[in-house]
Amino acid sequence: MNLIRLKNLIEQTGKTQKDIAADLGISQQRFNFYVNGKREPDNEMLTIFANYFHVTTDYLLGIDAKNGPATQSGSEPANNFTEEDIQLLEALKALSPRDKSALLAQIAALNALQDQESKPSPNQKGHE
């Protein structure tokens, strides 16, 4: 398993290794063995990791650079994120929880407005 990728994924969760181990249903010691390269996960555990971190097993093994999280240094953006998408994500990371909530509310309002604009008005029905 590619340990650098695993450690980056752990860091991106913002959780402790203890919390992740608990989420996975394994001991912290066992998880630390995987993270430090003292033990290789079997196929079942590799699949559990991939599902937990929302990546492919090939990504975890270092085979596929394109099916990982949003960015990895030295690789192309994954999940079809554009450079602008990545910049937005980086800007979001810097916001306070209060500002993130406010921004989510604004986005919801914009989406609702866009939905209203895309629906035909009653006067347009039958004139298409």
Image: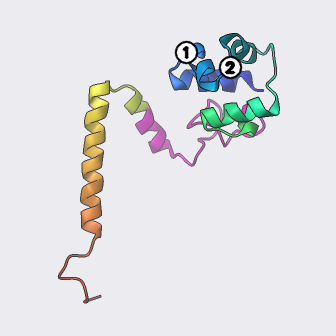
Q: Is residue 111 above or below residue 127?
A: above
Name the residue at 29% across, 62% down: 115
CB contact under 8 Å: marks 1 and 2: no
Rendering coords of residue 104 (x, y %)? 31, 40
Q: Is residue 112 above or below residue 11?
A: below
Distance of mark 1 from mark 2, alpha carbons?
14 Å
For label 2, the residue is: 26
User: Is 63 inside the magenta-drawn segment?
Assistant: yes
Q: Most extreme residue toward the front, as rendered? A: 25
Quick one: label 2, few (<14), some, or many (20+) residues within 10 Å? few
Of residue 27 and residue 41, the one placed in the foreground of this image is: 27
Magenta-drawn segment: 60-89
User: Is 68 inside the magenta-drawn segment?
Assistant: yes
**Relative side of 32 to 53, left or right:** right
For label 1, the residue is: 16
Q: Quadrant of residue 40?
A: top right
The amino acid pointed to by label 2 is Ile
**Relative side of 64 to 79, left or right:** right
Name the residue at 54% across, 25% down: 12
Rendering coords of residue 84 (x, y %)? 45, 43
Q: Most extreme residue toward the left, as rendered? A: 123
Magenta span: chief secondary structure: loop
Mark sitting earlier along the chain (1/2):
1
Name the residue at 26% across, 52% down: 110
Q: How many marks?
A: 2
Q: Quadrant of residue 90?
A: top left
Of residue 10 and residue 46, the one placed in the foreground of this image is: 46
